[in-house]
Image (spheres, coloured by chain):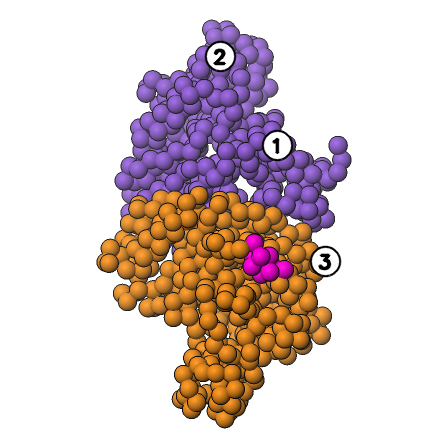
Chain colours: A purple, B orange
Amino acid sequence: MVGGGQLARMTHQAAISLGQSLRILAQSPQDGAALVTADVMIGDHTSYDAVVSFAAGCDVLTFDHEHVPTDLIRSLAAAGHVVHPGADSLVHAQDKAVMRAALRAAGFPGPKWASVSTVAEIDEFGDAHGWPVVLKVARGGYDGRGVWTLPDAGAATHVLEPGRRHIVEQRVPIRRELAALVARSPFGQVSLWPIVQTVQHDGICVEVIAPAPDLSEELAGNAARLAVLLAEKLGVVGVMAVEFFETPDGLLVNELAMRPHNSGHWTIEGSRTSQFEQHLRAVLDYPLGSTAMTAPWVVMANLLGGPDGGMRIDERVHHAMAGWPDVKLHLYGKAPRPGRKLGHVTALGSDLAEVRARAQAAARYLHQGGQR
Amino acid sequence: MVGGGQLARMTHQAAISLGQSLRILAQSPQDGAALVTADVMIGDHTSYDAVVSFAAGCDVLTFDHEHVPTDLIRSLAAAGHVVHPGADSLVHAQDKAVMRAALRAAGFPGPKWASVSTVAEIDEFGDAHGWPVVLKVARGGYDGRGVWTLPDAGAATHVLEPGRRHIVEQRVPIRRELAALVARSPFGQVSLWPIVQTVQHDGICVEVIAPAPDLSEELAGNAARLAVLLAEKLGVVGVMAVEFFETPDGLLVNELAMRPHNSGHWTIEGSRTSQFEQHLRAVLDYPLGSTAMTAPWVVMANLLGGPDGGMRIDERVHHAMAGWPDVKLHLYGKAPRPGRKLGHVTALGSDLAEVRARAQAAARYLHQGGQR
């Protein structure tokens, strides 16, 4: 697995049960996955030499992020390495312009959009489709970075990075955000977890509710069908997350990720097969596991570093364990920084309000202690 | 954790979620835990120099087996290392004569027994209490090794190892075997999972059923009380398994283990807190987690190496995953050998007969393929 963050860390946990051994290409020995895996190489995932030397002896190469250059992945495949997902699939999660074009060509719902590189093009789009608009870097954005809401003509002057490709999108009225998580094997087997609701603050996911409450069968069915069709159409191998906006006019695709995804962390305890195990089963071309839920409601809350660093305060972890003995804790071994994703907690049960309150209370305590 | 087998391997999986990093003292780089952990030392767990150099920098030392000499553990503690469980507790899991004497002194139920070192002593015991008797090495037996049933006087001649301490026990009429799994922290917090039934073939555990079916409240209560009392009395820190014989006259203690135990593997999916996480919480003096079950019935079946080596046959794993998508697989990364514990499977559900059939069918397929 290229990348040594928390996704690789949790994928390694799943690999152990499958009798597998995960090799990690990390940026630093302090990366979350590098701390806990036996087979770690430190290297630059944008360097062909580093990645090809890492890949030697691996059965399959897969990713915990989207930052490996598409051409590098093509070269690896040309050199005979098995790479899942492949470059032609993964590019749709790497490049928002490519993703939008593919969705449009397939007739899938999305906001109006355009590829842009100048302020004039952005202003033209805004004047034609209405302000405000949303500007995004085509490649490299994450957790709200590389995304700007522009109120009116000329506003792009302050944010547009010259020489970098961008897309501009209509700003749509959003009721809430949903996500579909799907896995597909090279054989073509597809599995799907229930559609979830994701809650964002400042562009960062803070909470995931499984299944999405009060979701009509029609919308749930649409989201599920669209995710499966997309996985087939794009030839995805592994896990893919499809993030949706629920709008008054139905669902619009917001983003794609082709790897285990924050919207699927709840599956570790909440589904018979976790997204991490399923990703491994898929890329290794094993049959996929059951995605049945283990409880009526599952809520995952991210642990973000508080102003004081938060999670490394051992006493706080101690108190949280005492206070919520049935909330499951996942710490990523990362150095604390305000706002950084340091871990997550998961609660399960039959009463959504209670489960949600429990997950949120434990996450809040870990974030800021007893302060209100 | 001293020892690099499957217990350390699964403890490492649990450590990752807690943000911890498990250091392993393994006998070989091919040990199951050594294959998947970042911090491995290869060394002899009976050598003071090896263990003390391993312990340097560890917050707490704990064990995945009972084979570290008691005096060595005492020396480590005297040198200032924190060791859980401590030597005075662990000796009861290391030495059957010490265990039997402690149980007798505490008034806990066990079979009649005696420390013996000669055939004459064994014959005297058998003549006094009736034949057959069971002879056991006091230290070092496991999975049926070091245990013999002797039909009559003189039979001990063939098995008694001169110079090795043994105990002889009355052979009791056994209805079935049960186990209680308890955890205790240095603070003194104690938690207990439901009493389980364990099924043995040729002295090796092949199946665990949680909770033990058709167990009277009285017997379940006795087993639970006895395990908790014993944990307190022996000052156990960490997980302790108490193995019982259910006899027409009630429960007799058979063996103790002070570490995660085969009878508790079902807790990975079957309990809100697994025995591996609980062992870590206990030895790190964190509050213990909830031991609530996640389903009415949970059945664990061990995967034993078949005549053809079994588990490494990838096609067989593939078929088993396809056939039982909701059975959870745990492979230990061990080289296959006939009869060796190579992994286990866990099934959960609300119908015991169905759950048991499912776990057994998957385990049988992995053991021997489609052969009947």
Residue drawn at (40%, 62%) of the image: B206
Q: Is residue A25 visible?
A: no
- Side (left or right) of A222 relative to B14: left
Query: Of the residues shown, which amino acid type is indicated by label 3?
Result: Phe
Residue drawn at (62%, 38%) of the image: A303
Q: In this orientation, which residue lies closer to the viewer: A327 or B36?
A: A327
Along the polypeptide, which appears first: circle 1 or circle 2? Answer: 2
Q: Which mark is residue B266?
A: none
Q: Give the structural element (helix, strand or loop) at label 1.
A: helix
Nearest to viewer (mark 1 / mark 2)? 1
Furthest-front residue in view? B248
Q: CA distance from mark 3 to mark 2?
A: 56 Å
B60 up-or-down from A46: above or below: below
Nearest to viewer (mark 3 / mark 2)? 3
- Side (left or right) of A372 relative to B101: right
Please state the extent of the stretch shown in magenta in the rendering. Answer: B217-225
Residue beneath disc 3 = B187
Query: Of the residues shown, which amino acid type is indicated by label 1?
Result: Glu
Q: In this orientation, which residue lies closer to the viewer: B154 or B232?
A: B154
Query: Of the residues shown, which amino acid type is indicated by label 2?
Result: Pro
Discs 1 and 3 share one subunit? no
Residue beneath disc 2 = A248
